[in-house]
């Protein structure tokens, strides 16, 4: 099939999505690839003709020498392990690698530059970001230096996919300070014209006014967005992220009707959809017993018009499982879609705190481990191991287990009761979580368990 034919088919598909809301059938090009068992499904970027793997390698959680994630661990990155994962990914068709100057405590780009530069430059696509969150990095000079530093660390003279990082997280004023008032948007457009940037886009979090303004610029022709990165998963498809009222379905359709290629982040909601409530887990395994629970989320995220789905992978088993899910992709059919919508409702009603462990809220000025508190709380309620009726024979066991594991998971001086509700974390949360209120919820729950004797 010629590139021109594919673009025409993609354009028609995008129009159908905008009119009908969503179609879950594979595109013509994708169906053709699906006839070749074991081959990674790829999608064509109609802006450049890039043949991009539907699985994107997220470089936020690279492995460390202590077998942990570099996002949380203070240990150094295990470069040999990273090299091995990159080699396996490339061998099995993964060719999109997404990083940032801030990932892995500032070491992600360097580690990925070492791993990727051992391979031919035309065998992979580099995605990275202008992550000038700190006011000290928002001047023209500092922001340009960040861009050039990315090129240096990746050992390359061009970036395939460059993003304004986390647009909307901080509101319109913050967005203009970081990208417009300092002239950086003009600089990045110049770099695209020179070929130093091949595709220019943005990742979106939170404030819908920012999203609308950037798309209005696109519509007016002030700037062409080659791609946009959004959060999309089966929970947020119909259930808006806490506090912002925006569903993934709405974001997706706004981009689809403009035929803007979409990159997906948080397909697992920071790992939450790999650890679903017990009743949901049981039903998923009944339907597809030989596949992981996470594979449901990855299959759902690969909607038509989606260029690639990012997964932050720490261990080789993560890489292998995700590669298997997408080699080739088996699109979610209508019956499975409805099943996942019911599952999403069950997850929301289960009462989880919608934290993705991005840690943008950290550090807390009072030392609270915000993601750690939320992760422990969610894990316990998902495992369905906390009976609420004191007459339940398992109540005493579950109460003790929760309290003991809480002290092991989160240092005592970093637990929820240390929060004074200062609110400094609120503007940083991409999920618009009322963090002080949720920490108070965790603290109240813990205190009730301490008081209630079996």
Image: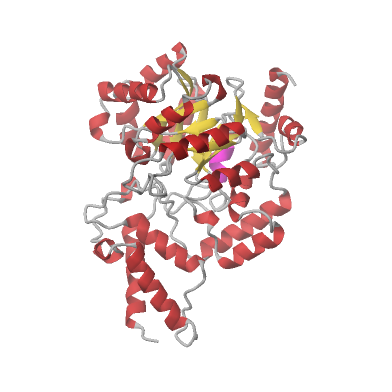
Q: Please determine whether, in this image, residue 265 is positioned above or below residue 160.
A: below
- Image quarter for residue 171? top left
Residue 445 visible in the picture: no
- Image quarter for residue 413? bottom left
Residue 286 in the magenta stretch? The answer is: no
Q: In the image shown, does 221 or 197 lie closer to the viewer?
A: 197
Q: Specify the color scheme.
A: secondary structure
Quarter of the figure that contains the C terminus? bottom left
- What's drawn in magenta, residue-wise? 248-254
Q: In the image shown, does 357 or 84 lie closer to the viewer?
A: 84
Which residue is at 40% across, 40% downward?
78
Q: Please determine whether, in this image, residue 396 is positioned above or below residue 27.
A: below
Quarter of the figure that contains the N terminus? top right
- Tell whether 421 sits left or right of 441: left
- Tell whether 270 sits left or right of 403: right
- Picture coordinates of residue 26, whole percent (x, y): 72, 37
């Amino acid at each position: 099939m010629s590139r021109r034919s594919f673009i025409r088919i993609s354009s028609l598909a995008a129009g159908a999505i905008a009119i009908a809301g969503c179609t879950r059938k594979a595109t013509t090009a994708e169906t053709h690839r699906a006839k070749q068992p074991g081959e990674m499904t790829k999608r064509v970027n109609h802006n450049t003709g890039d043949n991009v793997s539907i699985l994107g390698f997220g470089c936020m959680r690279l492995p460390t020498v202590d077998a942990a994630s570099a996002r949380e661990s203070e240990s150094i990155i295990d470069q040999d392990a990273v090299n091995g994962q990159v080699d396996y990914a490339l061998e099995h068709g993964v060719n999109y690698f997404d990083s940032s100057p801030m990932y892995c405590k500032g070491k992600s780009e360097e580690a990925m530059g070492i791993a990727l530069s051992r391979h031919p430059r035309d065998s992979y696509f580099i995605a990275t970001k202008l992550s000038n969150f700190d006011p000290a990095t928002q001047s023209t000079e500092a922001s340009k230096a960040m861009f050039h530093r990315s090129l240096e660390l990746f050992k390359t003279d061009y970036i395939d996919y460059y993003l304004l990082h986390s647009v909307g997280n901080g509101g319109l004023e913050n967005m203009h300070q970081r990208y417009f008032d300092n002239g950086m948007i003009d600089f990045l457009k110049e770099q695209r014209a020179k070929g130093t940037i091949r595709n220019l886009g943005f990742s979106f979090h939170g404030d819908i006014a920012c999203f609308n303004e950037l798309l209005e610029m696109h519509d007016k022709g002030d700037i062409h967005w080659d791609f946009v990165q959004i959060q999309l998963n089966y929970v947020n498809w119909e259930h808006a992220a806490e506090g912002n009222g925006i569903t993934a379905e709405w974001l997706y359709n706004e981009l689809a009707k403009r035929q803007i290629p979409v990159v997906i982040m948080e397909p697992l909601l920071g790992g939450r959809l790999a650890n679903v409530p017990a009743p949901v887990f049981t039903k998923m395994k009944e339907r597809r017993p030989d596949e992981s629970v996470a594979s449901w989320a990855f299959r759902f995220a690969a909607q038509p018009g989606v260029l690639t789905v990012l997964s932050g992978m720490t261990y080789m088993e993560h890489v292998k499982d995700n590669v298997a899910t997408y080699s080739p992709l088996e699109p979610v059919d209508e019956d499975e879609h409805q099943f996942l919508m019911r599952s999403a409702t069950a997850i929301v009603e289960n009462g989880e705190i919608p934290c993705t462990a991005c840690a943008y809220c950290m550090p807390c000025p009072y030392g609270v481990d915000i993601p750690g508190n939320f992760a422990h709380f969610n894990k316990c309620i998902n495992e369905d191991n906390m009976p609420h009726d004191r007459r339940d024979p398992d109540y005493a066991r579950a109460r003790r287990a929760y309290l003991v594991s809480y002290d092991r998971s989160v240092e005592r001086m970093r637990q929820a009761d240390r929060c004074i509700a200062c609110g400094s974390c609120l503007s940083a949360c991409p999920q618009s979580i009322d963090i002080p209120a949720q920490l108070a919820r965790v603290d109240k729950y813990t205190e009730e368990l301490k008081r209630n004797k079996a």
